[in-house]
Each structure stands twice: as C-alpha cells, then as structure tokens.
Image (cartoon, rainbow, N blue to C red):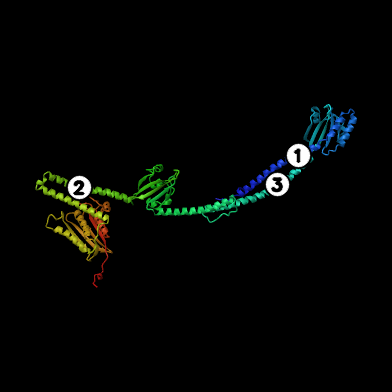
Amino acid sequence: MNNKIKYFQSIHFKIALVLALILLVTLEIVGAVFVSQLETKNVDSYKKQVQLPTYVNTTLINELSKTNISKANVGISSLLSDVDNKNSTEVEVVDAKNTVRGTNESGNQSQVGQKNLKTNIKNTLINRQSYSGIMSDPSNSRYYTVITPLIKSSNNELVGVVYVRANLDSVYREINQITLIYVAAALVAILAGLLISIVISRAITKPIDEMKQQTLQIAKGDYSGQVHVYGRDELGQLANAVNNLSVKVEESQESTESERQRLDSVLTNMTDGVIATDRRGKVIIMNDEAANSLETSESEAIDKSILDVLDIGDEYTLREIIENPDETIIDRSDNSRDLILHAHFSLIQRESGFVSGLVCVLHDVTEQQKIDNDRKQFVSNVSHELRTPLTSVHSYIEALQDGAWKDSTIAPKFLKVTQDETDRMIRMINDLLTLSRMDSNTQKINKELVNIKELFNYILDRFDMIIKSDDDSKKPSKDYKIIRKFTKLDLWVEVDTDRFTQVIDNLMNNAIKYSPDGGTITCSLYETHNNVILSVKDQGLGIPRSSIPHIFDRFYRVDKARSRAQGGTGLGLAISKEVIQALGGRIWVESTENKGSTFYIALPYEPIEEDLWDEN
C-alpha cells in the first residue's frame, strides 16, 4: 500500500493555505471598510465644497425680490460669473414662477427667461424642501446635484431656488486609484504572507515529520532513532514524549518478547497439552503436546473451532462451555493406540468480566484410567476367587456341623475338600503378596551364577519322579512324557534359583494341566548371541489369537470355567513375567489353537572364558 501523501493533502499545504486565506480575508475586509470609508469621506468633502457661500444665497434672494426683472437678471448673471467654485460644473437660478433667471454656463444663456424643465426643481418649488443626490447620465458620468430653496427671512416668502450640479468623476477616479494601490499592496502582502506561512508551516511540520518517521521506525521494531528537539515549546515537549515513548516501547517489547519466549518454552516443555482460543472459540495457540495427543499440527488447528479440534461438537456447544466451564473426559482411543484425555476448561476474562477466550488443558489419563480399571478388575477378581473356595468351605463346615462329622465315610472327604480349598486360598494370597512386593520393588532377588542346564534339568527331574512315584496320592491325574532338547554346552547364568524354579514350575504345571492324557511335553535349552533360550512346549488346546496379548495379565484365563475347575488362580503367568523381567529377561508365548502352546524364556548370557577359572 502506498502511504505517500500528496502535497495538496499535506499539513504543509494546509497550514500555508489557512494562513494565506486568513490574510486574504483580513485584507478583503479591511479593504472593503477602507474603500467604503474613503468614498464616504471624499464625497462628503466634495459636497461641502460644492455648496455655495451664504452671501451668494442672500444676494440671490435680494435680486429675485426686485421688481425690475431685467436689472435683477443682470445682477444674478454678474453674481454667478463672480462665483469661483471650480467644483461646480453648472449653477442655475430659477424664480418662484419656475422661470430660469440665470446660469453660469455661457452656452446656455438662451435658457434665461425660459421655463424650467427640470422636475427636481419643480418639486423643490412646490414642497419648499432642499434636494441633494447623485445621478448618472447616459455617458455613465456621475453628478452631485443640490437644489436649495431661496426664502426671504422677513416674511418666509419663497422667491426661487438655486440649482447646483457638480461632476463626481474626479472624486471616484481618485478613489479608484487609491483602491488599485491598495489592491496591489494587498497582493504583495498576500504573496509575502504566503511565503512566510510556508516557512512557518515547514518550521512547524519538520519536527512532526521527524516524529512521524520515528513512530514508523517504532512500528517496524527499530527503536534506535531519536527525534531532534528544536525548542522548549509544545512541539519540543511532544518530541521528548516521542523519544521517551520509543524507550518505553523498546523496554516493553523486550519484556513482552522475553515473556513470550518464556511462555513458549513453558508450553513446549509442558507434559500437558494446552489449547487457547479467542472469544469465538477459534484456536489461536496449541502446544506440541496437545498437537501430538490430537494427532494434528498447530498450523492445521489454528482458526478452527475448539469443538472440532477436540471432536466434542456433538456433546457440547461453545455457549455451554463458556457459561459452565467444567472438566470432561475425551476418549481418543482407536485400533492403533489407547488414549484418554482429561480436558479442563477455564475462561480468559478481563477485570470487567468480558470473556476474551478459553484455555483448555489436556492431561493424559490413559494410564490412570488403566490403573483404575485394573484396580477394579483386581478387586472383582480377588473377590470372585476368594468367594468360590470360601463358599465351598462354608458349605462343608455347615454340613459337618449338621452331623456329617459323625459319618466316618463322608467326614474325611469333607475335611479333605475344606483343606484343599484353604490351601488354594493360601496359594492365591501368597501369589498376591509376591506380586505386591514386586510392584513395590520390595521383593528381594538373590542372583547367583548357576549352570542353567543343570538347574533346568533338576527341575524337570522332579516332574519325572512324580510320574514314577509309587504313592498314588502323588501321581498326576494324567500321563505325560517329558522330552529334553538341551545344548551340550554348560551355560552359566545369573538367576535367583528359587524364583526361577517357581517360573518353571508354573510353566510345567500349565503344560501338564492343559495337555491331553499321554501327551508329550518338550523342553528345550539353547544359547544365541548374548541370550539363553528356554522353552516349554505342550500338545494342549492352544491359546486363541485374541487371548495371546493378555495371557500374562493378572487373573486372565482363556477358559475361565475350566481353569477354575482345575484349581488355578490366574496369577502364575503374571508372576512368571514379573520374575523374568526382574532377572533382566523376557518371556513370551507362541500358540496355535488345537495344536498346543510354546512358552519361551530369554535370559541375558555372557560366555565365561576358561582362563577366568584358572588359578594364579
């Protein structure tokens, strides 16, 4: 946009024009009054000069009073010729009978004795009133005419009138010359005043121009310039104010920029998402955390409605949020991730109460929600798991109290069930305590360097002994066969033998429990780069694909009815996972429905060179 001001729009021109117009109007008014007064004074002075002397009027009255007309006319003619009035161009005497008795014009002597034809003279004879006035002739010459009645003072008799006409051209010619001189002087004064006004306007506007340039520099962010102070007048004070303003604005800008950078740093490093809007709900600020949580970018969200950005337009309106800012839970979970956000809205208000925008703080409560759900599920599972054996124990004890204890056949069976259910509850409580200690990092892990092949083989030997046992009470409910596929190398690994044994027991018990009668359990041991791999493979029903991600969750069962009937607590695999992770390893499962499952354990392993064992 072109901000250049044309000269005729500038304050230079306006100040000069105003001063010139003031001078012009002043001179015009002064000139009009001067010329008017000059004309009046000159005409009045001329009128006085035109008046005939008093003695002439008296002599004319005496001559007109004579009865001898011829003699009187000679006297009148002689008197008029003796009157030296250079301003009077024509003097004429008319008696009361309207007869011309004399004139000073030699070319009009023939009118003497003739009747007067001038109307003004006739009117004066009739009304006996003096007449004076200015008239123009066809040649545009102006004349001043005076008609004076001649009245005898003795008897107040009108004896005639004297008519005097004087040419005013000389008077007006003089006035016009003076007017022209005044106009010329006025024009010179106007030109001089215009030049002076231009100089004055430039002197006034130069500091203003400098202040304008300084303010433009301030607007562009350049605060280095200073306005020159030319004096101690109002413009000087204004220049000082602009200089002080420049310093204050620079300080304020630096403070604002510092605060903005600090705010940007805070918003960038906040673990919570922050969204700010204007009063219409359009997004104006969004930090990276909010953008990442909402899977968008700040540039895409700017100028969009916060309802659309948060995808809550179906549940809320902007008016509802402004009138009742509250908290809400936003579920952004999908197939690729779980994300639950806690949104807290607050208003941006001025002291007057005017709402200028909204601030929304987004806090990721996914883990908290998961913990809450797990806690609820845990309480529900524990309650259910304890209720079943307690109900059985309570029922059998009631039966014993009702007299079943007297029956030597039934009483031992009831007591055996009661003992088994109690042992089951004790195992579950012990498992829960183990998990609790692991969660709170109070479970001690006593690592020692052991030959993992020998330890694994020792644990499996116990299960072989159960099959070969002669005691029917210790024999398993189904037959199985254990196949070992071990590496020939001795593998030395740091493990907690008790905890590791607990893990293998859990895996073997599950393999025996879910394998068919006469099935084969294959146990493998081999080493890879920096890892020892152990596996336990059964020929059971397998695990559905949808259940594999949850198989190590607490209290999770693929077939809950069957697992509960077989006495499981649903905590064995969860404990196994915690133990292996505490040993720095990893546990996972591969399974195909109706073909069996294979559980793998990977433990960190570093080969031990033989010279480390050599004695010095």
Q: Which marked residue is nearer to the observer: mark 1 or mark 2?
A: 1
Which residue matches tag 1? 41
Q: Earlier in the sequence, mark 2 or mark 3?
A: 3
Q: Which marked residue is nearer to the observer: mark 2 or mark 3?
A: 3
Q: Going by the image, does 367 lie left or right of 559?
A: right
Q: Nearer the viewer, residue 91 or 268?
A: 91
Rendered location of residue 39, percent (x, y): 75, 39
Q: Are marks 1 and 2 in contact (CB under 8 Å)?
A: no
Is residue 506 positioned above or below 611 on the image? Answer: above
Local crowd size for mark 2, using a 10 Å CA cut-off: few (<14), some (14–19), many (≥20):
some
Q: Going by the image, does 246 lie left or right of 305?
A: right
Rendered location of residue 72, percent (x, y): 89, 31
Residue 608: name its quadrant. bottom left
Q: Earlier in the sequence, mark 3 or mark 1?
A: 1
Q: Amino acid at mark 3?
A: Leu
Rendered location of residue 351, percent (x, y): 45, 44
Q: Secondary structure at mark 1?
A: helix
Which residue matches tag 2? 388
**Which circle marks residue 187 in the picture?**
3
Q: Nearer the viewer, residue 248 or 140?
A: 248
